[in-house]
Amino acid sequence: MVTNHVPRIKSCTEPEGSSMLGELADRIAILDAVIAYATALDTRDWERLGTLFTDDACWEYSGSGEKVFGPDAIVARISTGLERLDATHHLNGNHVAAVHGDEAEHTCYYQAQHVRHGLPDGEKFLGAGRYVDRLRRTPDGWRFTHRTITSVWSEGNPAVLAS
């Protein structure tokens, strides 16, 4: 469970070699992983998307209770849902990251625009909600061990997402 922990901001008078720099570097690297996820979705870079998850990762959509395990299954689930669309645009904001050694928690809001041309009741569907993540430091950087997607609101034509 991700807490709403806000990391303590250290004084500017602490030594430059303090753990503050390491924590800031970790938090930036975590945000880079979150941004890489959104970019991989929108560019359909499925290979890159798979590299963002640990082998034991879980991807969960809380609205349906759906859970998928492992990078290959996660990529297959996401790509199947997005390949039929003409475009997507995922934006993230209000990030909170907390590092605990080699483990981390992250939350943020998202807005995801989905476009599918030629539908009679509208070509766009906008969804918004939050991601709740757990990440682990690996030799290749921070990777998702668990990502939960919680939808908060939406507007537009839900048929855009239908198969």
Image (cartoon, grey):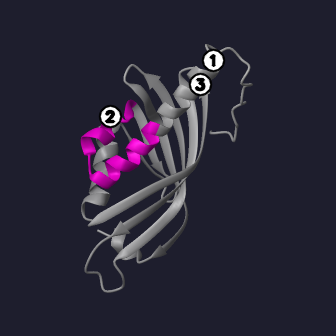
Taking 152 as reference, is 24 above or below it?
A: above
In the displayed image of the protein, which residue is found farthest to the front? 13
Residue 120 in the image, given as x and y percentages of width and height: 31, 86
The residue closer to the viewer here, 161 or 126, is 126
Under mark 2, the amino acid is: Thr
The residue closer to the viewer here, 50 or 28, is 28
Image quadrant where one finds the C terminus: bottom left
Toward which corner of the image does residue 37 lie, by quadrant? top left
Residue ID at (68%, 14%)? 15
Image disc number at residue 19: 1
Under mark 1, the amino acid is: Ser
* Residue hosting label 3: 23
Image quadrant where one finds the N terminus: top right
User: Element at badge 2?
Assistant: helix
Q: Residues within 10 Å of mark 1 (few under 14, many from 20)?
A: few
State which tag comes first along the sequence, 2 or 1.
1
Left or right position of 147 against 79? right
Q: Of discs 2 and 1, which sits in the foreground?
A: 1
Is the magenta region chiefly helix, strand or loop? helix
Under mark 3, the amino acid is: Glu
Residue ID at (55%, 52%)? 93
Q: Of discs 3 and 2, which sits in the foreground?
A: 3
Left or right position of 17 against 31? right
Toward which corner of the image does residue 141 lie, by quadrant? top left
The residue closer to the viewer here, 155 or 10, is 10
Residue 140 in the image, given as x and y percentages of width and height: 37, 23
Residue ID at (41%, 74%)? 158
* Residue hosting label 2: 51
First to last magenta residue range: 32-55
Is residue 22 within the magenta segment? no
State which tag comes first along the sequence, 3 or 2.
3
